[in-house]
Amino acid sequence: MQAKLILTPPVARIAIQGHFTFEGHRQFKEATAAALAAPQIETVEIDFAEVGYLDSAALGMLLLLNERAEGHRIVLRHATGTVRSVLDIANFGKIFEID
């Protein structure tokens, strides 16, 4: 998995590529920490356009991001297919904005 951070204030976009699993924990944490620490960032978008699979560890990482967000808006974008189904089954639409 790769997590690419793109800062365009007031939005930080983290584009994830590959399988979003525990193995990507370090990259995801580094990217989200940098996004949350960047000045003038109000929204953090997690882009799932190139993710074909995510597991329960990935869901946990998203929940931890939500806890650390401290007033930042978190948006999950471009989740389709199996990824969208997993997010829906986990009721993440009640926690995050899913676009």
Image (cartoon, rainbow, N blue to C red):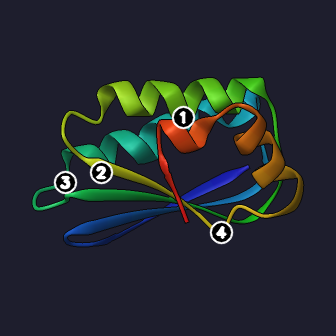
Instruction: Answer with left or right where residue 40 lies relative to residue 23.
Output: left
**Kind of residue indicated by mark 1:** Leu
* Most foreground residue, 90 or 23: 90
| Foreground pick, 9 / 72 | 72
In three-dimensional space, the C-alpha distance between marks 1 and 2, rounded to whole angstroms, equals 13 Å
Tell me the tag on residue 78: 4
- Up-down relation of residue 89 to residue 36 (above or below): above
Q: Give the Cα separation between the discs numbered 4 and 3.
A: 23 Å
Residue matched to label 1: 62
Q: Are marks 1 and 4 in contact (CB under 8 Å)?
A: no
Q: Mark 3 points at which residue?
A: 38
Where on the picture, by quarter, is residue 57?
top right
Q: What element carries label 2?
A: strand
Q: Earlier in the sequence, mark 4 or mark 3?
A: 3
Quadrant in which the C terminus is drawn = bottom right
Q: Is mark 1 on a helix, strand or loop?
A: helix
| Residue drawn where x is 11% and y is 62% of the image | 40
Q: Where is residue 98 in the image (x, y as percent from the top left)?
A: 55, 57
Question: Does dot 4 land on a helix, a strand or a loop?
Answer: loop
| Tag 4 and tag 2, C-beta contact below 8 Å | no
Structural distance between the alpha carbons of marks 1 and 4: 15 Å
Residue indicated by mark 2: 73
